[in-house]
Image (cartoon, rainbow, N blue to C red):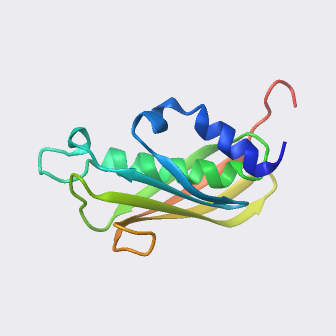
Amino acid sequence: MGSETAARRMLEADTASTALGMELVELRVGHAVVRMRLTEQMVNGHGIAHGGYVFMLADTAFACACNSHGPTTVASGAEITFVAPAKEGEELFAVAEERTRYGRNGIYDVTVRRGAIDGPVVAEFRGRSRVVQVNGQ
């Protein structure tokens, strides 16, 4: 199985992300772009995107990028900084880039943007990954 195929299969099986309408826009080894439109259910009491949904979008792009190498890879930790609000109806793009891999670990940065891949920044996310053994492999 090619490495990009592993990431695509992982996302297809991710009912949490796909139920929110997340769509893989671009994928190559160590890089992924995922898109999501903010719905009424994703807005908090201040009328802006709930941070949990922004985090989930970034985390999904991170998952696609770190699984693009092939082996099953999970998050060992992540953090996010919210830079600007986003509103209902807006489309968000999460652009994930691999920074480094060492042993079974990796570091990835994800920028969430509003309106386009190069639009205004909504959030910056850093994820740490770990390749795990599945079924004794």
Image quadrant holding the N terminus, namely top right
112 shown above or below 38: below
Q: Residue at x 37, y 74 (%)?
A: 119
Tell whether 108 sits left or right of 93: right
**Residue lying farthest to the right in this orientation:** 137
Looking at the image, how many numbered discs can be counted on the residues? 0
Residue 62 image offset from top left, x and y in percent: 57, 53
Q: Residue at x 60, y 36 (%)?
A: 12
Residue 5 image offset from top left, x and y in percent: 74, 45
Image quadrant holding the C terminus, namely top right
> Which corner quadrant of the image does residue 87 belong to?
bottom left
Tell whether 133 sits left or right of 18: right
Q: Nearer the viewer, residue 127 or 8?
A: 8
> Which corner quadrant of the image does residue 21 belong to?
top left
Tell whether 67 sits left or right of 20: right
Q: Nearer the viewer, residue 63 or 2?
A: 2
Q: Residue at x 26, y 67 (%)?
A: 84
Q: Residue at x 74, y 42 (%)?
A: 6
Residue 118 image offset from top left, x and y in percent: 43, 75
**Residue lying farthest to the left in this orientation:** 46
25 shown above or below 97: above
